[in-house]
Image: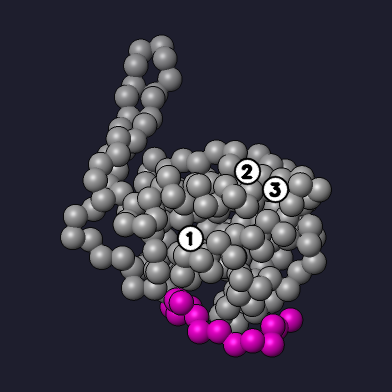
Amino acid sequence: MTNAESFTPQELASHYDFDKYMQMPRWCSYWHQIRIIQSLQPKTLLEVGVGNGLLRAICTHYGIEVRTIDIDPELKPDVVASVQKIPFEAQSVDLSCAFQVLEHVPYEEALQGFRELCRISRQDIVISLPNAQRAYPQSLSLPILRTLQFILPGPTWPYSKMIKSHFWEIGRPGTTLKTVIHDFSKIADLVTTFRVQENPYHQFFHFRCRSRTSN
């Protein structure tokens, strides 16, 4: 199935080659994606941004019915479409997700895409976004007690450039974490947000749709 509109892919299919793409920190981010999805126990899932297809394969393996959209037909999504116009009926899946996707469109369009994710989902939305603020992961092992893990924040990476295909990132002027939470929380209720200990560039968010009668 293909949406009538045509789009320019933000990343070439070769971007997802194993040696270039699947570094250890990214493997850890996939673990967090799957952990959150499994904890919510959806029967149906919409994934926006197919990437290398790993999330779809694993979720399907665990019995979740996965539907996918992407603007790049080479990635073989179920539907070629943009996140701003998802051609599915309202409340047609239990959970919608978009990992490292919304930063590839301008901020206002990202908010529109998030509205679409909320429209499609019956209850939960899970996303991740790049966080450009420098972070210092720490681990402390104590006798008897479990190992404590935490992240010490630092300033935005000095002199760092955004990835060419990104329009915005958390931690840069105009899109601080506080701003992003404020704007996205106008659309759905924030349940939790965290940075991945092994890959602090990835900030995860779990939102829950508000009662449809209050929208």
Amino acid type, mark 3: Cys
Q: Which of the labelled discs sits on residue 189, or is there none?
A: 2
Helix, strand or loop at label 3? It is loop
Q: In the displayed image of the protein, which residue is found farthest to the left? A: 159
Task: Tell me the element at label 2.
Answer: strand
Q: Crowding at label 3, few (<14), some or many (≥20) Cα neighbours within 10 Å?
A: many
- Given residues 68 and 156, the one toward you in this image is 156
**Is disc 2 in contact with disc 1, using a CB cutoff of under 8 Å?**
no
- What main secondary structure does the magenta stretch of the protein show? loop
Residue 115, can we see it? yes
Neighbourhood count class around disc 2 (C-alpha, 10 Å): few under 14, some 14–19, many 20 upward: some
N-term mark: 2 or 1: 1
Residue at image mark 1: 100
Q: Say if the magenta span includes residue 13.
A: yes
Q: Which residue is mark 3?
A: 209
Q: Position of residue 9 (x, y in %)?
A: 50, 80
Residue at image location 70% in from the left, 48% down from the top: 209
Q: Which one is earlier in the sequence, the residue at label 1 or at label 3?
A: 1
For badge 2, the amino acid type reads: Asp
Instruction: Using the rendered view, name the quadrant where residue 20 is placed.
Output: bottom left
**Residue at left 47%, top 65%?**
107
In depth, the one of 54 and 163 nearer the eye is: 163
Give the quadrant of residue 191: top right
The location of residue 1, given as percent across then percent down, is 74, 81
Q: Horizontally, is 35 left or right of 144 in the view?
A: right
* Residue type, label 1: Gln
Q: What are the residue bounds of the magenta stretch?
A: 1-14
| Separation of residues labelled 1 and 3 (CA atoms) | 20 Å
Q: Compare residues 127 and 113 and report the one nearer the observer.
A: 113
Task: Report the Cα–Cα distance between label 3 and label 2.
Answer: 6 Å
Tag 3–tag 2 contact (CB < 8 Å): yes
